[in-house]
Amino acid sequence: MVKLQRSDKNPILSPSNLPWENMLVFNPGAIMIKDKVYLIYRARAKDSIYSRLGLAVSTDGINFERFNEPMYYGKNHVDESLGIEDPRVVMIDDTVYLTYTAVSEDLDAEVNPNWKEKIAKKPRIALSTTKDFKEFVDYDIIIPGLSGKNSSLFPKIINGEHWLLYRAGAGKTYFAKSSNLTSWRNASPVFEERPGMWDSVRTGIGAPPIETSKGWLLFYHGVDEKNTYRLGIMLLDLHNPLKILYRSPEPIFEPETDYEKFGYINNVVFTCGAVEKDGKYFVYYGAADEVIGVATVEKELVLGLF
Ligand code: BMA
């Protein structure tokens, strides 16, 4: 069985004393630029339900330098009135494309008293681009009318079009194409939960698709009846990503350590980003929605599965 190996330096990022990230840091997107790993992570202040995005940079993929201010606050915008969450980043040419969940209050939904946050949230899929992590071009909500999350572009333009994966509601993950990043065509379902298995209740992408000789590699998450979040692998056909060539029968990573089992939300490992470095995949993940860890696996071991 292929399994991810957690770093013994974990958690590699925890909440700091900075007021905007003094409660939770988790679910980072990740990208390699000129031998450095950039993490764009979700951060929350104490007693606030708004998430903002922070930036951290590393040369070894383990020790990260952070900044005093959030990288991106999102906009003072009705669709982001409750913050921005779960960033996924890809780089095409010199531009970083950041898809994230824009969150506003869902006034039509009922508040479940068992929810940790006593507010109904409406998630939507939003996009911004940047070349320097300072100035952003905002595309806002890219699929109007859709309540959804867990989205990422593919890391290249294919036949003049961007490719996108996203989850609609709490259900299926879809694939769609666009030449302008705002109108998406041929939306088609790719995957969903598998009753009776480790990903029986909910699924969604984790890291953006990684191009390999065998297909598009996806680290994805699955949730079971006990609300345990685990990670698995999927391989999508390079030319037709609706075709699933492989899907993990067993998880490749699951909550085992205290910082994964106990936190803001217990029993969660949740990735939004992975990079290829030194012949390995470095998978960055939020642990118990509170801290950030990294776990690695040899690339050849993964590709040997297919
Ligand atoms: C999902 C997302 C993630 C979160 C996870 C576990 O629905 O909202 O941001 O890490 O739940 O709580």
Image (tube, rainbow, N blue to C red):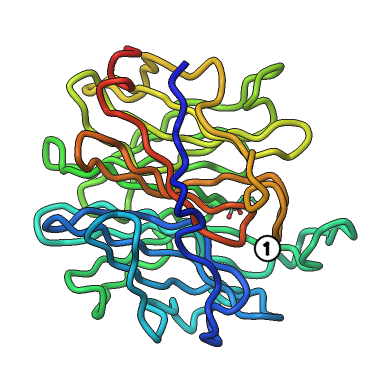
Which image quarter: residue 121? bottom right
Quarter of the picture holding the C terminus: top left
Seen in the image, is 120 located left or right of residue 139?
A: right
Seen in the image, is 55 located left or right of residue 193?
A: left
Q: Secondary structure at mark 1?
A: strand
Q: Judge by depth and name the residue closer to the eye, 147 or 75.
A: 75
Q: Mark 1 highlights which residue?
A: 121
Three-letter code for the amino acid on which mark 1 is drawn: Lys
Percent position (x, y) of residue 201?
69, 31
Q: Is mark 1 within 8 Å of ligand 1?
A: no
Q: Judge by depth and name the residue closer to the eye, 231 or 132.
A: 231
Q: On screen, 130 above or below 282?
A: below
> Looking at the image, which residue sits at the far front?
8
Q: On screen, 43 above or below 47?
A: above
Q: Residue at x 36, y 32 (%)?
A: 297
Q: Residue at x 48, y 49 (%)?
A: 285
Tell me how many marks there are. Answer: 1
Q: On screen, 82 above or below 230?
A: below
Q: Residue at x 22, y 43 (%)?
A: 277
Percent position (x, y) of residue 269?
57, 44
Which image quarter: residue 158? top left
Seen in the image, is 179 located left or right of residue 13?
A: left
Q: Judge by depth and name the residue closer to the eye, 112 or 56.
A: 56
Q: Judge by depth and name the residue closer to the eye, 290 or 235.
A: 290
> Looking at the image, which residue sits at the far right?
113
Percent position (x, y) of residue 207?
39, 43
At label 1, counting other C-alpha atoms closer than 10 Å, the crowd grade (few under 14, some 14-19, many 20 or more) is many
